[in-house]
Image (cartoon, rainbow, N blue to C red):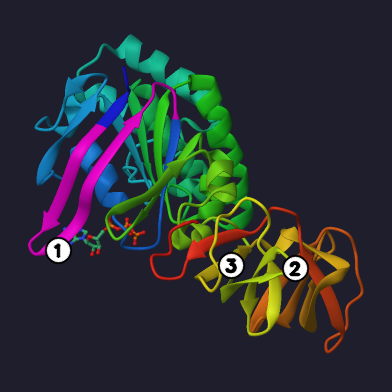
Amino acid sequence: MASVEIRGVQKHYGGFHALRDIDLAIEEGEFVVMVGPSGCGKSTLLKTIAGLETVSSGTLFIKGRDVTRLEPGERGIAMVFQSYALYPHMTVAENMGFGLRMARRPKAEIDAAVARAARILRLEEQLDKKPKQMSGGQRQRVAIGRAITRSPDVFLFDEPLSNLDAALRTQMRVELATLHVQLGSTMIYVTHDQVEAMTMADRIVVLQDGNVEQIGAPLDLYDNPANLFVATFIGSPSMNLIKGKVKTVNGEAFVDAAGTLLPVGGKHTVTEGQEVTYGIRPEHLELADDGFEGKVGVVEPTGSETMVFVHAGGKDILALFRERHMFTPGQVIKLRPRKDAAHLFDATTGKRI
Ligand code: ATP
């Protein structure tokens, strides 16, 4: 039985179609990340699961129970927001025990649940503090603690790390992943940050304009993006995308992009003259004497890697090298896509070929 099942969910805000026929089954214990650009509908989808938004049509099940018409408090979920939403006049312990107090649970049970959450989140020394005496990361841990004390069937996270600085975000990412392993609970997490999605998710749901573009394990999406949108959205730096036409030279298929020949590799079925978008990830380009020529533009050495923009095929292509190279702007170098690393997309539909 799926932990959460979303069947044919639609959401209209007046004339605006925010969710378009969403189907999704989330397994018990899965960490699913919903990702997409601003306005794609990810928060709306999370809120419909939480019961903070009604659906226009469709059905929602949590642990096999139809919760579509139930109040948030009856759904067995706990939600963590970007804004923490802590009560400023309550201590950490009071904030964490709030849900159980509202549910009129016995004091001993509340104390035990708060102590357990504090232990898991390393907040034992902070229980008597007020939120304003804590850092952003600590406050977010309290908000997560408040969710843990309720022992929900499903945890819902709405961009919980967005208010934190970069270093703290990285640390909290690890903490959340560890928490997921410790608790083994089903978690649904919304973010616009594809790095968070890639690093934390068992499966990622990519949304755009209220549609699910693709669902899959992070590396599946990285290696086999279903369309140009997913190819562009997943991966940092982004995949290079170059428009051109299929051309056969000496029996081998290439994409001719403004005179630059980019090898298609063996795994795509293409026809002569077909208009396509050629995709190659920056780390899948290597220096090779039989590669295509390009002129070096901006060079960005970061220490661990070197990024270099190379003008070829009518645009600037980014190549990323783990080993150190000394490039100088204006220099002509030859690049070859790694064998079978090329992605091809239909020029009209954007779908993977
Ligand atoms: P962000 O990352 O910016 O929060 P999102 O992907 O979470 O974006 P949603 O908040 O789900 O986006 O909103 C999806 C779309 O629905 C947006 O275009 C938004 O303007 C619209 N929308 C959301 N809530 C309402 C509402 N209460 N009334 C009307 N339109 C809404």
Q: Is residue 297 left or right of residue 80?
A: right
The amino acid beneath tag 2 is Asn
Residue located at (53% from left, 65% from top): 271
| Residue toward you, 91 or 207 | 207
* Mark 2 within 8 Å of ligand 1, using the beta carbon: no
* Mark 1 within 8 Å of ligand 1, using the beta carbon: yes
The amino acid beneath tag 1 is Phe
Residue located at (86% from left, 67% from top): 287
Q: Is residue 118 left or right of residue 1?
A: right
Estimate the x, y position of residue 24 in percent, counting from the top left.
Answer: 31, 36
Q: Which mark is residue 353?
A: none
Whether 346 is drawn above or below 68: the answer is below
Instruction: For mark 1, give the secondary structure.
Output: strand
Magenta stretch: helix, strand or loop mostly: strand
Q: Is residue 351 left or right of residue 280?
A: left
| Residue toward you, 129 or 33 | 33
Q: Which residue is mark 1?
A: 16
Whether 124 is drawn above or below 6: the answer is above
The stretch of residues the image draws in magenta is 6-30
